[in-house]
Amino acid sequence: MRRDLLPYPGFSGGPLIDVQGQILGINTSGPRRSVLTIPVSTVDQVVKQLLQRGRVSRGYLGAGFQSVQLPQAVQQTLADKRDVGLLIITLAPDGPAERAGLLIGDIVLAMDGKVLTDPAGPASHT
């Protein structure tokens, strides 16, 4: 089933509501004239942090990543048999990643017990 959401101009910031009247998130404009919906759980977290701290706290690793295909030999040694890791392509001078001993060219498979496969994922942002 294909689902399209095409809001009228100026509707960015409006809620996405299901048929039961539940708010699912806030709509905003995305790339290439697409529409993105920020989930209500994310909005709740941001509001909570703004009220408590006056700002949104974000983790900072100080590394830039690119997805990379893992060699077959490495894939076979992994319990989950995944085929992608994150190649470190940049390091911020004296950033947390560099201080921890990571090097450009290292491949990161997991962080804090969570598998990493997408450089745009929350834990992999610079």
Image (cartoon, helix red, strand yellow):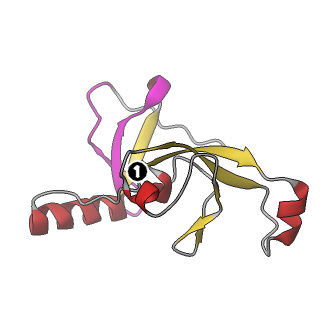
Query: Is residue 114 found left or right of 40 in the rendered image?
Result: right
On screen, residue 2 above or below 70? above
Choose top left, top right, bottom left or bottom right for residue 89. top right
Is 86 contained in the magenta span?
A: no
At 79% from the left and 53% from the top, the residue drawn is 70
Choose top left, top right, bottom left or bottom right for residue 17. bottom left
The answer to whether residue 1 shows anywhere in this view is: no
The residue segment tinted magenta is 9-32
Choose top left, top right, bottom left or bottom right for residue 78. bottom right
Badge 1: residue crowd in 10 Å (few <14, some 14–19, many ≥20): some
Task: Tell me where residue 49 appears, x and y as whole percent.
Answer: 19, 65
On screen, residue 91 above or below 77? above
Is 19 contained in the magenta span?
A: yes
Kindly identify the amino acid type of the residue bearing the numbered disc 1.
Answer: Gly
At 9% from the left and 59% from the top, the residue drawn is 54
Query: Is residue 107 found left or right of 121 in the rendered image?
Result: right
Task: Tell me where residue 101 appears, x and y as whole percent.
Answer: 50, 61
At 41% from the left and 56% from the top, the residue drawn is 61
Task: Tell me where residue 120 appears, x and y as whole percent.
Answer: 52, 47
At 27% from the left and 43% from the top, the residue drawn is 14
Along the viewing direction, whichever of 77 and 122 lies nearer the viewer: 77
Secondary element under disc 1, as helix, strand or loop, is loop
Task: Tell me where residue 5 appears, x and y as whole percent.
Answer: 48, 37
- The residue pinned by badge 1 equals 62
